Image (cartoon, rainbow, N blue to C red):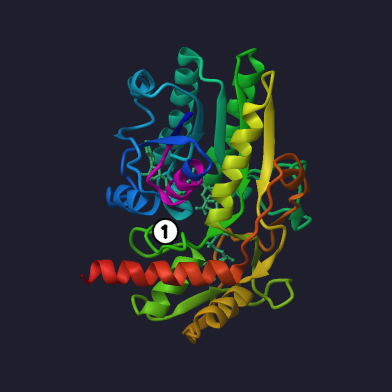
Amino acid sequence: MKNILVTGGTGYIGSHTALALREAGYQPILLDNLDNSELFVLDSLEKISGVKFPFFEGDCRDSEIYSKIHELYPFDSIIHFAAHKAVGESVENPLKYFDNNINGCIVLLAAMKKLHVKNLIFSSSCTVYGNPENAMVTEQTPLAMPESPYGYTKLVCEQIIEQVLNSSSNLSASLLRYFNPIGAHQSGLIGEKPVGIPNNLVPYITQTAIGIRECLSVFGNDYPTQDGTCVRDFIHVCDVADAHVAALKHIEKQTKPSLFKFNIGTGKGTSVLELISSFEESTGIKLNWRYADRRTGDVIEIFANTDLSNSTLEWKAKRNINDAMRDAWNWEKSLHDLNNA
Ligand code: NAD
Ligand code: WQD
């Protein structure tokens, strides 16, 4: 069974990907500093998969950690999820994001070179497209200066990886630009667990539905879109996880150093109001929401052209937003039971 180092492995997308890797016959080796996740995720992964995933508590910026892990579990591929991802926080504290996200990526690349690790799958984001003229973006859509320091770290890391790869290293890399991952594993044992007040729409919806939040504010109803609210490409986190397995299988087949970029989305735009309706339809719960002012920095409309990822990776999102809303609500209820046990 091939070892795959998964940095940020107890995080939201990392934990779902670890499960998908195991199901695909890989052995995920998890590295996480628990800055934005908790140890109970390991127990949940064991309950779901029946196996204990090797876990190392440590920081991606620690250059020694990689050889320590490599000695015990030799690996030739890394999936790099570990990063800070709160857009608002990045505006208040850009240096925290530049250190963690950019420096973390640089130390990881240096370790890959030292250990002759060949393959890297990097967590990027559609944020690198900024506010695109054409809402449906392909991988060739010109990149733009993202609105936030967080988005900037994704753009810079993509360029650093490309430069390192061009410096005749024996590195292959796949940059996966996720759109809006939502939902949770159907078991209700893992999911998104934001710290404090959620920035993102779906956890705010489920926390409003369960009574943690009073009312959901819909940021803006006067956008030039079909119903006046922003449009996004919301993709089930388990489809994002499956995309990583597909990207890993694809990069393992490469016979020479290669760089790939893929949009990881459903290819469909969904408005904020449509997502709220999907939640109400999937759960039978009437959500308490109201219109509020626009949120600074919000992109009006963006969704993925997924032709390239569908064809090259032989991967396509197979779950819809109703599945995601059902699973997100299931997870919120499990969290509630966990907190009130
Ligand atoms: P998350 O915060 O749930 O997971 C990130 C994990 O990395 C956490 O468990 C955290 O403790 C860990 N971590 C952070 N810094 C670390 C460090 N220096 N060393 C070791 N571990 C560290 O976030 P997520 O939603 O799972 O996102 C995973 C990746 O996907 C991130 O790179 C994020 O930028 C990217 N991404 C996320 C979204 C999204 O909407 N969730 C969208 C696009 C891209
Ligand atoms: C979606 C829509 C809001 C909350 C962010 C990051 C991106 C990526 C995914 C990391 C927007 C509206 C939201 C609320 C609302 N993260 N909204 N009320 O902004 O598309 O993307 O998360 O990589 O980089 O930018 O996601 O869920 O915050 O917002 O009306 O309480 O929902 O205005 O239109 P976003 P989001």
| Callout 1 crowding tier (Cα within 10 Å): few <14, some 14–19, many ≥20 | many
Residue 150 horizontal/vertical position (percent): 50, 45
Dividing the picture into quarters, in which one does residue 308 lie?
Answer: top right
Circle 1 sits in a helix, a strand or a loop, which is it?
loop
Q: Is residue 74 magenta?
A: no
Residue annotated with mark 1: 191
Main SS type for the magenta part?
helix
Q: Which picture quadrant has residue 324?
A: bottom right
- Residue 135 vs 253, above or below: the answer is below
Name the residue at 72% across, 58% down. Answer: 267
Residue 294 visible, this orientation: no
Magenta stretch bounds: 7-21
Residue 247 seen: yes
Please tell me which residue lies in front, 134 or 180: 180
Residue 299 lies, in percent from the top left, at 64, 59
Amino acid carrying mark 1 in the image: Gly
What residue do we see at 65% from left, 60% from top? 233
Which of 127 and 172 lies nearest the eye of the viewer?
172
Identified at 36% across, 50% down, the residue is 45
Is residue 132 depicted above or below 207 in this figure?
above
**Residue 133, how many percent across, how many down?**
77, 55
Ligand 1 shown in quarter = top left
Q: Is residue 38 left or right of residue 302?
A: left
* Residue 211 image offset from top left, x and y in percent: 35, 80
> Is 340 or 136 nearer to us in this picture?
340
Q: Quadrant of the C terminus?
A: bottom left
